[in-house]
Amino acid sequence: MRMRKGHALIALLLASSALVSGCNGGKEDAAEAAKVAEAAYPQRVYWGDTHLHTANSPDAFGFGNRLGPEEALRFARGDEVISTTGIKAKLARPLDFLVIADHSDGFATIKDLYNAPRSFITHPTMLRWYDMMHAGPEQSQKAVGEIIDAKAKNTLPPELLNPEGAAERLRKNWYTHVATVERYNEPGKFTAFHGFEYTLMNRGNNLHRNVIFRDGANEVAGFMPLASFDTIIPDGLWDFMDAYERQTGGKALAIPHNSNLSNGEMFQLTDPSGGPMSADYARRRAAREPLVEITQIKGDSESHPFMSPNDEFAGYGDAGWELGNLDFSEKTTPQMQAGSYVREALKRGLLVEQRTGVNPYKYGVIGSTDSHTSLATADDDNYFGKHSGSEPSPTRSTKSQGLGRVDERVGWNYLASGYAAVWATANTREAIFDAMMRKEVYGTTGPRMVLRVFGGWDFTADDLKGDWVKAGYERGVPMGSDLKPGSGAPRLVISALKDPQGANLDRVQVVKGWVDGNGVAQEKVFDVVWSDMDKRAMVGGKVPAVGDTVDVATASYANTIGAPSLATVWTDPEFDPKLRAFYYVRVLEIPTPTWVAFDMVRFKLKLDPAIPLKQQERGYTSPIWYNPA
């Protein structure tokens, strides 16, 4: 990898433990990014992962991962690497950008503990964990399970929370990490973002956020990743982001994820005091958290059949995840579900806005992996698992993922999901970050389908015959935006193209949410365009199934059904101009094999017939909102 001018200075400063704030990395990045030509409006979509863990994450290292940020970045840009378990790994198609989001809690601590001389370990519990991590992968995973449980219960030994010299080691590890990320950032070619994961958790209820910086080493290196110990609300993270922006002039955003494992705590209608959410609190949350991760390895967070009984495609990838919270310390009840899923959050946002004038959950949506292998893989035929213990092997699909705890989740419950898609004007930190802030983004469960939506008032089918993208920007708004004032009913220009190397498309749907005249949040799913419409007429208000060409014996399918592209101009047939609403698009592929099906063929396995071997992968766009005010 070529080291650019200024980055050698960073490395030299790091080697002498000097402050990175004396380097010019951030200024140089801005200068190089300025040389990249930006389009007048987004011309193409950029693919990436905003949620990848390396050996610097305590759990990833304890699981066995020995690949650091450098291997992760090389892999994401298309290089072949050797996985922790010794398997050659390479992406068929490189990514355009990557965020290494290693856990701030104990950043590189477990790696440092593992590499320390045994005679230096005096605390009996830490010594036991040390020995377990050196006893092999199974014992190491159990040790990490115990550490995660202790963290959730605030019972970690002080020596692990704040060991002697911890601040200096964190500073050194963070500087080294920042320098590596900086070295791989190539404006116009590949974007490497600085970031970390804020692992907020309450009694095992997942409240995690990924933090992404728009800036370079000059701004980021002076701010150590914020730990989440001794707190169960996100306000401290927002304070950290405020301080960062105030002191550096930079920008940061946070992305909640795995709301499906929060037992209803991610998207509450109250503030941390338990009272009704205020306008100020809603405004602060909306400003700091413009996006939400809608799909990833640990399940899909779009919707659940309990809240969406009329949605035949609700609950994708829920198996195993709807039973309990992150560490299975609390079972999940149906009443908890409303605060755990993104569609419900969008509806709750309308309710809060109706009462306060501010929508705290006005989210754009993305997908990402949350892989702990350092390998950002979301293709079912190239899936490297959640952590190093679930890299390709004959047993991974049925092996417990409990890490020594009581846990009903097994390998096949995990998804090979997902990726973030960003409509940006260039492949630079600045352009991609700004697109995220304006929510011109979408998420998929892995396929690289190209989705575009514009909302307006006067679009017609004729627009699709011309430069409809230009028309979309001139006469409407893109995904992630508020509709401009207009008359009549909202019209959406929708275009969906299949992944060039993937499956044909089954259908395009519009998901509408609104607050009715009685102040109750409602939803409806509209099938708006689908393949073979002349042969698949609606029956009882439903579009018949597209069919199935999957051959599980060979883990293959045929693109003899479905369509390579689907496009339409859709008008809301039930629009009421007095009611606030949102619209987002969901696109479904034809059935394809799951990663478990590929494993079954690769390793000649005999599996329980109850394990699903087929799926309909999908993409979700950010919403477009209508506000009567």
Image (cartoon, rainbow, N blue to C red):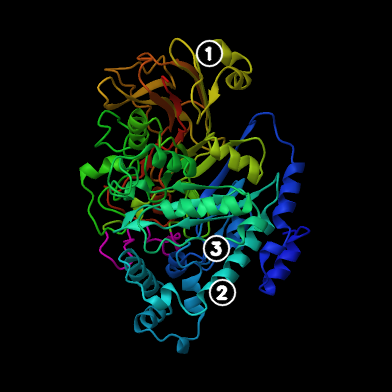
Residue at 48 percent across and 72 percent down: it is 109
- Dot 1 alpha-carbon crowd within 10 angstroms: few under 14, some 14 to 19, many 20 or more: many
Q: Secondary structure at mark 1?
A: loop
Q: Tell me the kind of residue under disc 3.
A: Met
The answer to whether 146 appears left or right of 501 in the picture is left
Q: Quadrant of the C terminus?
A: top left
- Majority SS type along the magenta span: loop
* Above or below for 563 versus 16: above
- Dot 3 alpha-carbon crowd within 10 angstroms: few under 14, some 14 to 19, many 20 or more: some
Q: Secondary structure at mark 3?
A: loop
Task: Return the residue at label 1.
Answer: 459
Q: Nearer the viewer, mark 3 or mark 1?
A: 3
Q: Name the residue nearer the viewer: 100 or 597.
A: 100
Q: Secondary structure at mark 2?
A: helix
Q: Which residues are magenta?
A: 387-407
Q: Quadrant of the N terminus?
A: bottom right
Task: Return the residue at label 2.
Answer: 168
The numbered mark at residue 224 is 3
Is residue 132 visible in the rendered image? The answer is yes
Question: How far apart are labels 2 and 3 at the CA level?
Answer: 11 Å
Question: How far apart are labels 3 and 1 at the CA level?
Answer: 49 Å
